[in-house]
Amino acid sequence: MANTSSQGSWETISPNLRERVRGGKAEYQAIVRVNGEQRTKKVVACNRTEAKKALPAVLALLNGSNGVAVGDRSVTLEALYEAWAEREYGPNGKLAANTLMRHKGVFLKHVLPILKPHTKGADLTVGHVRRMIDKLTTKGLSGATVHACVSALSCVLSYGVRNESLSRNVVRDLERGERPSAARTTDPRYLSMEQIGRLFAALSIEFRPVAETLFFAGLRISEALSLRWKDIDFESNTLDVRGTKTKASAARIPLHPQLAQVLKAHRADAGRIGLQRIAADALVFPTASGKPQSRRNALRAIANAGCRIGLSVSAKANECEADEQPVGCHDLRHSLAANAFEIGLTDVEIARVLRHANVNVTRTTYAGITESGLAGLSTKLAGVGGGAA
């Protein structure tokens, strides 16, 4: 009864759940028989673990036993989430693809386990939200992750309010200052080209192309991991950025010659694994099993490489000499801007590469100075007032 998912056919992976892989992307479907009639429904998930967690709510909808009808005050948090996710993946969805993926990930991994899947949405209070924030913070999650959890919960509850299943969104009852900040708590790093080169050399064959794409294209990590081969045009030397943070960030940018060579070599390596890895719709940077790569893995790889070459101290063992914060994925985007300023690109030109709608963001946030640039600045300042250079 099971089919081969690698050929694009459905494969049964558990009772009432099947999977197929097309163009390197996994799809999931719930299947059930009701009164002799076979019913199927898409399961919104990125991997098998997520699909199995989401399956009960989808089966409830198929069976008609717990559907999210307008005004249904008995709807569970899990069913409410499933209905919200289905809407967002449809034509009426409002969230950008990466924002939606982020909300789904933190909701399934953090929010549901704490608030419990079968909790009735109408029973939630702001006290539940406060306790959730306390538990997530105690677990050591970053402010940005906790903020994302609260935002994801707020989106789901807002959907419940619009559906008249909830009287209000209790997240909005949080007092000023209770909602965790998503602001970065560390200063950005501006790496010189010499440091960038050493960082690339310290990375594995799996993550070096990712880091080079972050730097040479100035991409955010979510944008890099969303890239598909159809987004890269080696003939016109352009790269289409999709699935972005904002609509203004979606744009076509020039493909750096060095990055073009990196991606061509990476494509050749992927093609040797299987032609499905280089199909137009296939991800450029999947995992070894063909699944979407995680941001956490990329961040860990880059931070550890920075530690090995002495740019930062390991969080687990002080085995590096430099007493600085870990190198992050976004530091490569900052470093591109800083090095571009040093070689004379204008703020308008850099804003175009970074896809900033407002050039002032480029001037105030990304106009940092690398260590080599700082040395050059010192030389220039020596000439102020007629001093010797």
Image: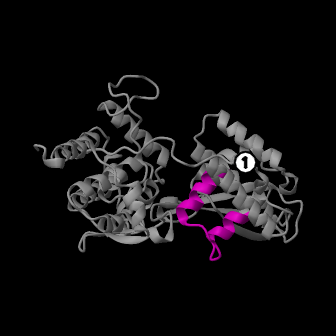
> Does the magenta stretch mainly form a helix, a strand or a loop?
helix
- Which range of residues does the magenta coloring cover? 83-107
Q: Nearer the viewer, residue 253 or 46?
A: 253
**Residue 362 in view:** yes
Instruction: Give the structural element (helix, strand or loop) at label 1.
Output: helix
Q: Position of residue 35 (x, y in %)?
A: 84, 69
Numbered-mark total: 1
Mark 1 is surrounded, within 10 Å at the Cα level, by few (under 14), some (14 to 19) or many (20 or more) other residues, namely many
Q: Residue visible at 49% across and 44% down?
A: 296
Quadrant (top left, top right, bottom left, bottom right) of the C terminus: top left
> In this picture, is 160 found above or below 287?
below
Which residue position holds label 1? 112
* Residue 88 within the segment the image draws in magenta: yes
Q: Amino acid at mark 1?
A: Leu
| Residue in the picture at 39% in, 29% down | 313
213 is within the stretch colored magenta: no
Quadrant of res 195:
top left
**Quadrant where the image shows the N terminus:** bottom right
